[in-house]
Structure formats: C-alpha cells, structure tokens
Image: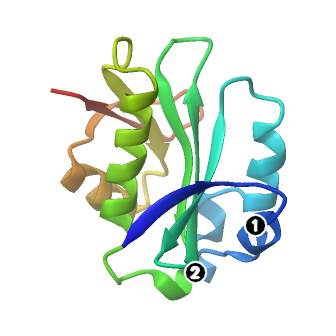
Amino acid sequence: MITLHPIDKDNWEDCIRLKPTAGQEKWIAPNLYSIAEAQFMEGFKTRAIYHDEEMIGFVMYGLHPHDDNYWIYRFMIDGKYQGLHYAKPAIRLVLEEIRNSSPDSTHEIMLCYKPENERAERLYSEIGFKEAGIAPWGDIMARYRFI
C-alpha cells in the first residue's frame, strides 16, 4: 500500500538519504535542498512516500503565488524502489491530496521535467498530464486537469 506522510522531525533524515539512480541526479534537486526550500515557500508541502512502512520517495508541491496553479516541484522514487510500480499510485495520491485540500479552486496541476527525461515524460503522460509548453529555463511543462 502506498501512502503519503508529512516530512517531520521523525523522518526527515530518512528522507534525505533517498536518492534517484546515478543517471537521474542531474534532473532533481537533493531532498535536503527541497525540504529547506519548502520552509521559505508559503503554502508548499513536503511529503514522504511510503510503501507499507518503508519510505520509498519524496514529493514537494504547493500553490504557486505567481500563477495560482498548484505545482508539483519535486517527485522522486529512490533508485532501489524504481521499476516496482510505485510511482503511478504515488502521483495519483498527490493529485488526490491536492484536490482534497482545495476542491473548489483546484482545476489543474502543473509540473516540469527535463526534455531528455523520457521516463518522467512517459510516467506523467500515462497519468494524464499533457505537455503545456517550454518553461523559460528549458524544461517541458505539463498540465493535469481534473475532470
């Protein structure tokens, strides 16, 4: 079973030990950086992704003040847990949590990924994200719309 739990004083050190595969490190900020960054971004949340009792990943999301869209800033599954079909249920839980936190105002979720990150493109596309242009920094933007 996949669940989300807040990052707190009891699990943050486990979270910063999670790492993507060696080839993926260039595509995502370290979890320690993301946890620190979220402290200064009003309305952003950090969550640990668990499979049963084992922490397997991390996500950071929030309502961006410049465009009033929810953005998934970070999403990662630890390298040793990749390929075990945890990513899709985890992303779906994130989408559900965002929708439940603001059901009247949340109609779409945004995220970005590097153009060369084909695995991310495939994952997000299979969940229902649609390409929405290129960000000024060169990442592909994708949008998920709630029906």
The reply, left or right, for residue 76 in relation to residue 96 is: right
Residue 64: % across, % down: 59, 21
Residue for point 45% across, 38% down: 111
Does residue 68 appear in this view?
yes
Viewer-side residue, 104 vs 74: 104
36 shown above or below 66: below
Which label is found at residue 21? Answer: 2
Identify which amino acid the numbered label 1 is placed on.
Asn
Which part of the image, by quadrant, shows the C terminus?
top left
Residue for point 35% across, 83% down: 84
Q: How is the image coloured?
A: rainbow
125 shown above or below 96: below
Using a 10 Å C-alpha cutoff, classify the residue at mark 2 as few (fewer than 14 neighbours), some (14 to 19) or many (20 or more): some
126 shown above or below 128: below
Residue 65: % across, % down: 62, 13
Using a 10 Å C-alpha cutoff, classify the residue at mark 1 as few (fewer than 14 neighbours), some (14 to 19) or many (20 or more): few
Of all residues shown, which one is farthest toward the bottom?
80
Query: Circle 1 — which element?
Result: loop
* Alpha carbons under labels 2 and 1: distance apart: 21 Å
The reply, left or right, for residue 133 in relation to residue 20 is: left
Identify which amino acid the numbered label 2 is placed on.
Thr
The reply, left or right, for residue 30 in relation to residue 26 is: right
Residue 61: % across, % down: 56, 38
Q: Which residue is mark 1?
A: 11
Classify residue 17 by image quadrant.
Answer: bottom right
Viewer-side residue, 10 vs 29: 10
Quick check: marks 2 and 1 in contact, CB under 8 Å? no
Residue 129: % across, % down: 26, 41
Which label is found at residue 87? Answer: none
Viewer-side residue, 93 vs 137: 93
Residue for point 51% across, 12% down: 68
